[in-house]
Image (cartoon, grey):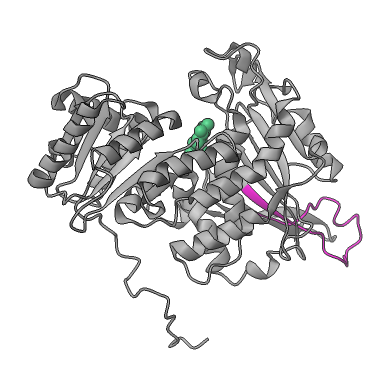
């Protein structure tokens, strides 16, 4: 194509320039929770430190505590000192702290929400936030209804004179497709879909966005990216941590709902979708929706899925307890801490290529990766002995840690004979770039303030993801306890059997 060709869909703005949020503020519900303390508050400071928030940015906490402005500042200060990625600068902190306020109340308390509305109006006047507010619901979904209806009643859900109001929500987005629909209905009854920002923090990770760069900015990979060349795809999200302290959220939820429904299916969508005609939110989402709609479990589920629960074991040199002995878990809990499934994508590009997804707690090590494993060459010049040490070619996108991309292929072993063995060609972010990657939440909070919604799943994506998972969850529902696996291993034996039946094995990352 001629380099003078101009794509009429492209917006002429230079996308490499840093994007700075315009006048605005954020209200956090659930600000004393774990997520706010560990991720959201440090990310807000990091954004301010990078000069990406407006000078008059305001941060309002809403919660039950009877806190003054000074108490709230102390709390945020502690969270920032403990969790910020960038260096601490007193002047940045002081400017941010000036715009901090706390409103005390319950979610069913009309007077508290009226006080919040008054606080926002005061800040609009004193800080120049211009009526632009994002409401971050860092609360369990059973409170969404109360909060969005209070925002509606107190007239905070709609801006006036061209100002905007947005809502940012955190998973779990329902328990299955039906409850996700109900939840979406509640949120969309007050906030139109283009004002709703659903967080899937995996989409905020640099390496996840790089999947699109890798596929669509290069010529090298796309010709191979289909059923003619790809044997299968493995998506692994392994964690070494256990669930101590998280019983309230996790018991009854389990690994599939916690991680496969959102993070892993979003990774699958990015790996498998067709190329959007242009990189913008609408086109990107349209492609993700298409591929999710074409995705379904492989049957029979007795053979194509596996689930497990960790028992006591060794995590490195540490002796750790099993799930049933973790604080707060029902000793009879059937909650799975490991889940694996086999999916198929019914499209010309992917027909016959299994996508194996697995995730688990207390596994051998923390690693998230996507391995695209290629077929054997249809004909080999070398005899079998020469290539006996060679496995299939693979392209591995390492989401974390050691972020990068690895290509695995056969190479001649130096010497007088022809012997081929696997080698790795490795791209590491830390070596190729001097810039440090921002935290996922920095990117996502900034994007929400900028009204840039590419990295936020829509209601339709969420419901389609549940539609893929629901049959598997139903199948597991009546099958009692998941299979045991000792902490520090790679999951239950049924996960290996699931692969062995297809003549394949999991990668040991
Ligand atoms: C969350 C899950 O969405 O992702 C947690 O609820 C999990 O169970 C976490 O530990 C992992 O995130 P990350 O960014 O550390 O891979």
491 versus 299 height, above or below: above
Rendered position, 445 above or below 221 = above
Magenta stretch: includes residue 380: yes
Q: What secondary structure is the stretch in magenta mostly built from?
A: loop
- Residue 412: x and y in percent read 77, 60
Q: How many numbered marks, from 0 up?
A: 0
Q: Quadrant of the C terminus?
A: top right
Q: Nearer the viewer, residue 362 or 472?
A: 472
Q: Nearer the viewer, residue 379 or 439?
A: 439
* Magenta highlight range: 370-395
| Residue 190 shows up from this direction | yes
Residue 424: x percent and y percent?
66, 54
Position of 18 with respect to 277 (left or right) is left
Spot occupied by residue 229 in the image (x, y as percentages of width and height): 76, 64
User: In the rendered image of this protein, does residue 355 appear above or below residue 174?
Assistant: below
Residue 144 belongs to magenta span: no
Q: Is residue 455 left or right of residue 386?
A: left
Q: Is residue 448 above or below residue 183?
A: below
Does residue 322 appear in this view?
no
Image point (42%, 80%), residue name? 8
Residue 409 pos. (x, y %) = 72, 58
Q: Quadrant of residue 305?
A: top right
Q: As rendered, which of 374 and 172 lies closer to the eye? A: 172
- Residue at 27%, 33% (x, y): give it: 80
Q: Is residue 210 left or right of residue 93?
A: right
Q: Please, which residue is most extreme toward the left here?
A: 126
Which one is in front, 435 or 121?
Answer: 121
């Amino acid at each position: 194509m001629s380099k003078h060709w101009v794509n009429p869909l492209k917006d002429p703005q230079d996308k490499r320039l840093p994007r700075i949020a315009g006048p605005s503020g954020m209200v956090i519900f659930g600000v004393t929770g774990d997520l706010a303390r560990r991720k959201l508050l440090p990310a807000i400071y990091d954004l301010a430190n990078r000069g990406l928030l407006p000078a008059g940015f305001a941060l309002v906490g809403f919660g039950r505590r009877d806190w003054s402005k000074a108490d709230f500042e102390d709390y945020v200060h502690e969270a920032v000192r403990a969790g910020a990625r960038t260096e601490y600068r007193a002047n940045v902190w002081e400017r941010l702290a000036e715009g901090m306020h706390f409103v005390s109340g319950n979610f069913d308390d009309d007077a508290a929400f009226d006080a919040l509305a008054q606080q926002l109006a005061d800040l609009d006047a004193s800080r120049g936030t211009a009526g632009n507010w994002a409401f971050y619901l860092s609360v369990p979904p059973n409170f969404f209804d109360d909060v969005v209806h209070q925002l509606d009643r107190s007239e905070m859900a709609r801006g006036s004179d061209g100002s905007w109001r947005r809502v940012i929500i955190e998973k779990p987005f329902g328990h299955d497709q039906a409850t996700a629909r109900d939840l979406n209905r509640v949120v969309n009854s007050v906030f139109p879909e283009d004002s709703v920002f659903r967080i899937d923090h995996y989409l905020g990770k640099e390496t996840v966005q790089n999947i699109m760069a890798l596929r669509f900015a290069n010529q090298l990979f796309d010709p191979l990216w289909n059923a003619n060349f790809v044997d299968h795809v493995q998506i692994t999200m392994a964690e070494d941590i256990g669930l101590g302290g998280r019983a309230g959220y996790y018991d009854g939820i389990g690994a599939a709902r916690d991680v496969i429904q959102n993070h892993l299916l979003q990774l699958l969508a990015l790996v498998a979708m067709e190329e959007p005609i242009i990189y913008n939110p609408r086109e990107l989402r349209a492609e993700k929706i298409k591929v999710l709609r074409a995705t379904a479990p492989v049957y029979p589920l007795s053979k194509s899925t596996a689930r497990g629960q960790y028992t006591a074991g060794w995590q490195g040199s540490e002796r750790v307890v099993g799930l049933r002995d973790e604080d707060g878990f029902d000793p009879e809990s059937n909650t799975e801490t490991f889940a694996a499934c086999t999916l198929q994508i019914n499209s010309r590009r992917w027909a016959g290529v299994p996508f194996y997804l697995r995730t688990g707690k207390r596994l051998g090590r923390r690693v998230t990766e996507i391995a695209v494993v290629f077929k054997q060459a249809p004909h080999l010049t070398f005899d079998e002995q020469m290539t006996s040490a060679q496995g299939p070619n693979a392209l591995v996108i390492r989401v974390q840690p050691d972020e990068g991309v690895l290509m695995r292929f056969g190479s001649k072993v130096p010497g007088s004979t022809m012997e081929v063995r696997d080698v790795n060609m490795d791209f590491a972010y830390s070596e190729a770039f001097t810039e440090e990657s921002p935290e996922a939440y920095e990117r996502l909070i900034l994007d929400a303030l900028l009204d840039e919604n590419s990295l936020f799943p829509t209601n339709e994506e969420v419901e389609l993801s549940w539609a893929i998972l629901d049959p598997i969850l139903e199948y597991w529902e009546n099958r009692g306890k998941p299979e045991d696996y000792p902490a520090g291993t790679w999951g239950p034996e049924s996960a290996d059997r699931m692969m062995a039946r297809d003549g394949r094995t999991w990668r040991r990352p």
